[in-house]
Each structure stands twice: as structure tokens, then as C-alpha cells.
């Protein structure tokens, strides 16, 4: 399906354009009113990253303040968690398959022995579902991010002596290579086009600059992959992903940005933190 009028009305945005007045929340509402049902599901998968954060917060504290950008509200989580506990195979359109799998796993006695953390396990399931998408753009975007994260994780694990096998997510070719290879390039030269760029970014000592370079790489990827998608949903999804990046940098650019960024760094495992895009 083509969205001529919708795409023609999207403003021109640039990376790190922290003065843009595009609101991600308003954009989400507007798109949900205009996209076809199948395309709304693709949009929901992108915004599920906030559901993941909200779910982990909710499980720790049912009164926690949740990010409104998530697809599910606190009431939804209350209903769904009760539903899952009462039903072996719950059928609810609000419940993404990977979320049901996550709930079943964390209630298993074996979970703590087999998984490093709830956060990493949830991220793995999230990526796993996205990689099953029949939409090539969505599949490739999530795999691209998965590869970036895994390579950066592999480099950091070598630097700090962490167990790379427990921190790398997924089972694609890049993930397997990062877990098993001792070569500087993880044996991936010629396999992952952006490998050299990622390895150079990994050498950046200033973590804020490193984040900027990673986002610049992702922004360029979105530009390249949607160059010939003039009026399709792929261009809309790319626009949403760009606005997500801009809003993250706006958060880090406000008066308390340095405090927020220090808090982000404090939560990292000595530079190793897997991010769900």
C-alpha cells in the first residue's frame, strides 16, 4: 500500500536536529489512525521497545511510572499478567508472542541458571520475533542493529574480560562468530559490510561520541535502504526510527542531560550493555 499524502506531509528532519517540533507521541497516534492494519503491526513492533522497558519496570514495581510510548498501558499489563498466570495458551491481540514466551520462561525454575538477566533475555526474544518479520525492511533493520550490538559487545567483553557467550544475543552468523572467534575481526571481514566502521567506533573512548557515531551510522543506513521507497510504509517506518533517535538526543541535550547520561553510563556493565535499538 502506498501513502502518497501522508509521506508528502512528513517534514524534512536531520540527524541531531534537537530543535525539531516533531513529537514521537503525536506521530504514533497519527500513524495508527492512517496506516493499514498490517502496517500498524510493523509500527507496533518498533514501539514494542518501550513495552519491553515498561514490562521490566512493572515487574519490579507495579506502581512504576511507565513510558507512554509503549503499546500497552499499566492496566493492560495488569490484565495480561493475570491472564497469563491463569491460562496456558492465552489468546489476546495485545500480547506479542515473544512477551508470552518471556512470561513463561521467567516463571521457570531453570531461568536463573540458563539466562544472564531478564533484560538480555527479553531483548533476545524481541529481536528473534522481529527477525521473523516478512517485511524485509523490518527484518534487515533489526538484524543490522543486532549485529552492531553484538560486535560492540564482543569488543567490550575482550577488553574487560567478560564471558562473551552469555552476553551476545541471537544465533545468526554474526552472533555465532562473535561468540566463537578469537580473531580481531571475529572472522567477519566480507560478511558484515559495516564491520570496519563498527570496530573503529568501538575504539572511541568518549562514550557520548561513540553513541553519536553509532546513530549516524544507523541514520545513513535508513537513508540508503529507503532511497527507492518513495511512498511505501518503509519510508514511514524509517521516519519514525529517525524521530526516535532525535528524541533520545533531545533528552540528552536538555539542562539535566549530563546527569541523565551519567545515570545511563552507571547502569552499563563496564561498557557492555545490549540495547534494543
Image (cartoon, helix red, strand yellow):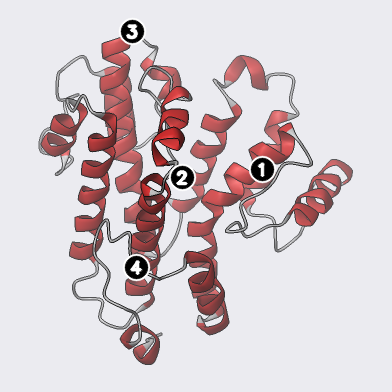
Horizontal and vertical percent position of residue 252? 39, 45
Q: Is residue 139 left or right of residue 159?
A: right
Q: Is residue 170 visible?
A: no
Circles 4, 3 touching at the beta carbon (< 8 Å):
no
Q: In whole angstroms, how far apart are the C-alphas of marks 3 and 1?
A: 30 Å
Q: Residues within 10 Å of mark 3 (few under 14, many from 20)?
A: few
Q: Is residue 201 above or below residue 165?
A: below
- Whether the residues at callouts 3 and 1 have beta carbons within 8 Å, the answer is no
In whole angstroms, how far apart are the C-alphas of marks 4 and 3? 42 Å
Say whether disc 4 or disc 3 marks the residue closer to the N-terminus. Answer: 4
Q: CA distance from mark 4 to mark 2?
A: 30 Å
Residue closer to the observer: 259 or 139: 259
The disc at residue 127 is 2
| Coordinates of residue 112 in the picture (x, y in percent) | 65, 18
Q: Nearer the viewer, mark 4 or mark 2?
A: 4
Residue 184 lies, in percent from the top left, at: 14, 19
- Of residues 78 and 183, the one nearer the viewer is 78
Task: From the image, tell me which residue sits under label 1.
Answer: 55
Question: Residue 161 — which label?
Answer: 3
Reading the image, the residue beneath label 4 is: 20
Please tell me whether residue 66 is drawn above or below residue 163 in the rendered image. Answer: below
The residues bearing labels 4 and 1 have C-alpha atoms spaced at a distance of 30 Å
Amino acid at each position: 500500500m502506498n501513502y502518497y499524502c501522508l509521506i508528502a506531509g512528513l517534514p524534512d528532519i536531520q540527524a541531531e536536529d534537537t530543535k525539531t517540533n516533531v513529537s514521537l507521541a503525536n506521530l504514533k497516534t497519527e500513524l495508527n489512525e492512517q496506516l493499514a492494519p498490517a502496517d500498524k503491526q510493523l509500527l507496533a513492533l518498533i514501539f514494542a521497545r518501550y513495552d519491553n522497558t515498561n514490562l521490566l519496570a512493572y515487574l519490579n514495581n507495579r506502581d512504576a511510572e511507565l513510558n507512554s510510548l509503549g503499546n500497552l498501558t499499566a492496566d493492560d499489563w495488569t490484565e495480561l499478567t493475570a491472564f497469563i498466570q491463569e491460562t496456558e495458551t492465552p489468546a489476546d491481540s495485545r500480547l506479542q508472542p515473544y512477551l508470552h514466551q518471556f512470561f513463561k520462561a521467567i516463571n521457570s525454575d531453570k531461568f536463573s541458571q540458563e539466562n544472564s538477566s531478564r533484560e538480555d533475555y527479553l531483548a533476545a526474544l524481541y529481536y528473534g520475533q522481529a527477525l521473523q518479520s516478512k517485511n524485509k525492511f523490518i527484518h534487515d533493520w533489526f538484524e543490522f542493529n543486532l549485529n552492531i550490538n553484538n560486535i560492540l559487545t564482543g569488543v567490550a567483553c575482550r577488553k574487560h574480560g567478560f564471558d562473551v557467550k552469555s552476553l551476545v544475543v541471537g544465533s545468526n552468523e554474526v552472533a555465532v562468530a562473535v561468540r566463537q572467534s578469537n580473531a580481531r575481526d571475529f572472522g567477519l571481514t566480507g560478511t558484515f559490510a559495516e564491520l570496519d566502521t563498527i570496530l573503529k567506533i568501538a575504539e572511541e573512548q568518549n562514550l557520548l561520541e561513540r553513541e553519536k557515531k553509532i546513530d549516524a551510522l544507523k541514520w545513513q543506513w535508513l537513508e540508503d535502504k529507503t532511497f527507492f521507497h518513495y511512498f511505501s510504509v518503509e519510508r514511514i517506518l524509517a521516519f519514525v526510527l529517525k524521530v526516535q533517535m532525535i528524541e533520545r538526543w533531545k533528552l540528552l541535550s536538555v539542562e539535566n542531560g549530563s546527569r541523565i547520561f551519567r545515570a545511563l553510563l552507571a547502569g552499563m556493565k563496564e561498557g557492555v550493555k545490549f540495547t534494543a535499538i
